[in-house]
Image (tube, rainbow, N blue to C red):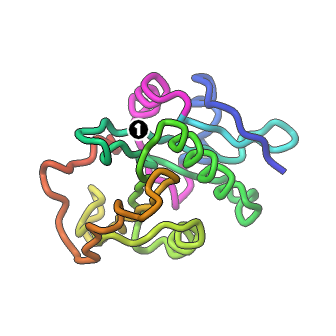
Amino acid sequence: MSCLREMHLDDLFKFNTLVFDPFTEVYRLSFFIRHLAQWPELALAALTPQGQLAGFIFGKCQPATDATNLHGHVCALTVESRSRRLGVASLLMNHFAHMLDLKNAWYVDLYLRCSNLAAYQLYCALGYCLRRVLLEYYPGDPGENAYDMRKPLAIDVLGHSLLVASKQSVHLPSDEESDDEYN
């Protein structure tokens, strides 16, 4: 069983085995520091019973331009290979969604590699829906596309946040450019 806590700054120097996993996107240290500073409640660590880092999630809460726009975005989620298939990712994702529910966010979204079938199945099981495919999303890997997935939160009882789903393959428009900094 894992326990969750907010990430600490010194955790950034303990998670190399997690960050260099082939299923994890690699970001600059400034990315993690910025997220810890701006959204500390949305940066969570999962610990093993022995106190070792088993996984983490970094996310953000996007500002609202109207009453239905406040939403969260999962920027990074990873679980150490020995802790996979034990519910750690689900625990992190469910707690993240709960934190966004407390902020009255309408939905949470995320991007993932189309080649990561295990992650896609996990997100579908957690209630995420495919919105669209983002063509050539990953820098340095032009053949890899991303799934854009979304899950409505408690305030969106009627699922209005899913109504704009196109499921079409598109290039990410310039006004939706990700601020996620890859290494």
Q: Is residue 135 left or right of residue 73?
A: left
Say whether residue 26 is magenta: yes
How crowded pointer 1 is (Cα within 10 Å; few <14, some 14-19, many 20+) is rated as some
Q: Nearer the viewer, residue 109 or 52?
A: 109
Say whether residue 99 is magenta: no
User: Is the residue 131 above or below the residue 42 in the image?
Assistant: below
Residue at figure coordinates x 63%, y 46% from the top left: 95
How far from the left and from the top, in percent, is residue 43?
Answer: 55, 35
Q: Nearer the viewer, residue 168 or 75?
A: 168
Tag 1 secondary structure: strand
Amino acid type, mark 1? Cys
Residue at figure coordinates x 48%, y 48% from the top left: 76
Magenta range: 20-41
User: Is the residue 77 above or below the residue 11 in the image?
Assistant: below
Residue 176 visible here: yes
User: Is the residue 158 above or below the residue 37 in the image?
Assistant: below
Q: Nearer the viewer, residue 183 or 166?
A: 166
* Residue at the limit of the structure toward the front, as seen here: 158
Q: Is residue 165 left or right of residue 107?
A: left
How far from the left and from the top, in percent, is residue 5?
Answer: 69, 33
Residue 183 visible here: no
Q: Is residue 89 left or right of residue 85?
A: left
Residue underneath mark 1: 61
How far from the left and from the top, in percent, is residue 84?
Answer: 71, 62
How far from the left and from the top, in percent, is residue 55?
Answer: 65, 47
Quarter of the image with the C terminus in it: top left
Residue at figure coordinates x 41%, y 50% from the top left: 106
Q: Nearer the viewer, residue 162 or 50?
A: 162
Residue at figure coordinates x 45%, y 26% from the top left: 33
